[in-house]
Amino acid sequence: MRKVPNQRAVIDRRRLAAKIEKIATAGDKPDRKAIVAELKESLAKGRAEIASRLEAEPSAGHKAANAQAFLIDQLIRVIHDYVIGHVYPLANRSSGERIAILAVGGYGRAEMAPQSDVDIAFITPIRNTAWCEQVIEAMLYLLWDLGLKVGHSSRSLDDMVRMAKQDLTIRTSLLEARYLWGDQDLYDQARDRFWNDVVKGTERQFIAEKLEERDARHKRMGDSRYVVEPNVKEGKGGLRDLQTLYWIGKYIHRVRSGAELVEAGLLTQVEYRSFRRAENFFWAVRCHMHMITGREEDRLTFDLQREVADRMNFVDRPGKSSVERFMRFYFLQAKRVGSLTGVFLAQLDEQFASKSTNLLSRLRGRKRTLKGFEIAAGRINVPDDTFFQKDPVRLVEIFTLANREGLEVHPEAMRKADRDAALIDRSVRNDPRANALFLDLLASHDDPELALRWMNEAGVFGRIMPEFGRVVAQMQFDMYHHYTVDEHTIRAIGKLAKIEAGEVAESHPISTKLIAKLKHRRALYVATLMHDIAKGRGGDHSVLGADLAKRVCPRLGMNEEETELVSWLVRNHLLMSATAFKRDLSDPKTIGDFVEVVQSLERLRQLLVLTVVDIGAVGPGVWNSWKGQLLADLYFASEERIRLGHKGHGRDVRIAAKKDAVIGLMGDEAGLVEDVGQTFHPSYWIAEQEDVIASNLRQLKAKGDAPLSIETQYHEDRGATLVTAIGADHPGLFSRICGAIHLAGANIIDARIHTTRRGIAVDNFLVQDPHGRPFHEDAQLTRLVRGIEEALANKVKLVPQLAARPLTHQRSHAFEVRPRVEFDNGASSKFTVIEVNARDRPALLNRLSRALFEAKTIINSAHITNYGERAADTFYVTDLLGDKIVSESRLKTLEKKLLEAVQATEEAAG
């Protein structure tokens, strides 16, 4: 155990023991309450001292963790001495009436966070005697009275050996065992038996089981070091990964500290210093989290990130907030842990291989060379320590060859690449060979994702492409993006390669067909690499990224046409999703404005595929079939406009074609198209899809004279459920239906509002559950219909019930979302387009639509998009006469009412 500075300021054991001795001997019977009070006071004072030390030195993780373990050590020792001296004193103990107390697990390493479990093992020579059981029980009760969470075991020596052989968790826990108090000889016996009877001969088995356990844990935690709410203890690249290395080193070489991993040949001195730096940082973060929450909290959630960043003295810088800088440092440490794990395990593998003399291992060890690199057992390695130094371009070449030949980069080569990455200077970055190799890898037909990931882990990616180096480990502080910028980018490139290989044709059929038609396929790979490369620079990352592309592409060896295309794609990489998700695609002006920017089929195809891979790499569940449907609708409408220009199908021709298509769908009920359909305005036929029109016509016919008809249909192709409400039109109808749908637990993703010539409202809503899946279970659909009926009959109080519902994203309060209202009278020839950005809350759409109704506007359609904690709701509206709203004073009044509606949702939730 590392010595804790000024130990008595944390806890003075002798003084505490003297106080307890005085209380215990003051009367006929020890005053248990007074003793517990003294212990509690010492625990509280010790914790306060550790907290003040961490506040004064906020990055001193090891010191805080060691001091916490020291505090608990001293308390347990005092408790033990009090129990055997005053509660269960025994003058002549037999040989079986002995107890050794061991600190095990992380506590055994003398490292504890403030709210961690106290893991102790009581070892006895034989099965517990009555006295041993009494002492153990009395000690545990006192520890529980202090409010400590105690993980304990009580075993004889034989039981300890038997159970450690059977259970990996017990074996790992005992591997860390440290003598805490009690019978020292018994502890020595336990230690010797553990090493001789449990460990000996099981080294390979332990490594295999430990790595399997690690992989399962990673999978459970998201299987990436770069998830934006990482688990500091259990997550990939976190404390547990470092501890796993130490456990393996200790099991194989019996190292007593992390420093001895260097002597064992498993880490270099430089790597061990990295090990200690990462470990110290993670311990500091974990201790701060425990102190902030007052509980064992190991997930670094958004709300904690901001507070820990402040505690650790991270400050804002141009383009990056303090929390983003803190999380970038966190992810750089996690990345380093990944590199250390690779070289550690490779070194271990080499050590075991050198001991093996069987024929198979000799065959696996046979080598061949490729361009100077050594290849053996499916791995590519370097022949000597100075190979990269002789020609730094090889630092790029090794990853290109690994990808082309289907090889794994040997961890020893990764270690040397990591060490020598700094050799890539301006001259190497401008070397045509290096750039050609990099571009070959990036645009490889053999899925470059894994090789690019290796290149990033080794630090080579950020050196050959310093523009990318600036976003390595950079977090995007919001609830929409699940990964750091570099991880998102590499995943997007991998997604692109899978589309090109035809591996995801079922979920991305259009992109799969289009990618084969591209004239400039490698431009798409470079655009995918660069689409977010300017994040964190302060300013619009699309504009800044486009300027960067103009400088980077020629360096990579791309021609003028390719460079211009990459720059355009980066500049406009958000255009297609913004148009598809926030605009009315049935409005010809929407398509016209979009095509005016895109201009060519090549750009349109490139942009569609880039948009698909960008959304798909944001995180699990972000892509869905509804988004795919909207992008497809925009693509095909734009493709037609580009091919035919303004000679495209006129409005009357399009309506007639739509009616013919609906007639084809309706079979025997085709007469409804002219009978019922003639009550609809022409805009209805343009706005709705053929299958929705057919469904609306049947529902209108079936409704007859009933005041209200509500139907639901699960649409697998849209990834959503269609909810249609038909009834007499009246003010506030849309607002009440929105509220009822949200109360039923559904999210509206699209809405179209129509009124027939006879004054009947036909409102079509597409809804999903909060996880982006359709509502299709009978109970869900019944609740939805009943909720709308009750809301329209004024049987429920929508506003208070919506306000009482929890946030869609429970931790969204950690983010500042500034409400914003934007008006656009140029986006549509008939409607004023209003976009409201605000914190996503269940009552939001209801409040906004009610505000628009009270402001005497008519909503034609609503398009709802969510970006994590932020909602972007777009409305196509007119005034009561059907005209656009152009008056400045009227627009200012509208803005005020909408912002008041947003504020009302915030206050109600608060």
Image: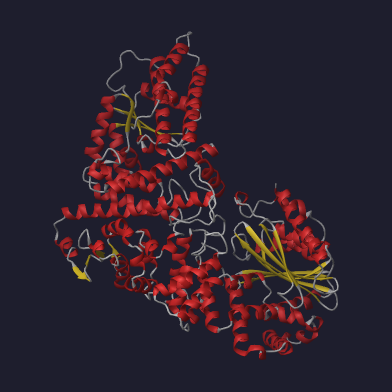
**Position of residue 27 in the picture relative to residue 829 (left or right):** left
Number of numbered callouts drawn? 0
Answer whether residue 507 is visible to the viewer in this image: no
Q: Is residue 325 above or below residue 697?
A: above
Query: Percent x, y for residue 303?
Result: 57, 47
Residue sitting nearer the eye, 326 or 408:
326
| Residue drawn at x 20%, y 69% as measured from the top left | 369
Q: Quadrant of the N terminus?
A: top left
Residue sitting nearer the eye, 133 or 575:
575
Tell me where residue 139 sits by quadrant.
Answer: top left
Tell me where residue 882 sits by quadrant.
Answer: bottom right
Query: Percent x, y for residue 790?
Result: 78, 59
Colouring = secondary structure
Query: Percent x, y for residue 138?
Result: 44, 23
Residue sitting nearer the eye, 304 or 722:
304
**Position of residue 890 in the picture relative to residue 868 (left or right):** right
| Residue found at the far front of this picture | 427
Answer whether residue 856 is visible to the viewer in this image: yes
Query: Percent x, y for residue 129?
Result: 34, 24
**Position of residue 859 in the picture relative to residue 243 (left or right):** right
| Residue drawn at x 21%, y 45% as measured from the top left | 201
| Residue drawn at x 43%, y 69% as measured from the top left | 494
Q: Is residue 461 above or below residue 20?
A: below
| Residue drawn at x 71%, y 89% as measured from the top left | 650
Q: Is residue 633 above or below residue 394?
A: below
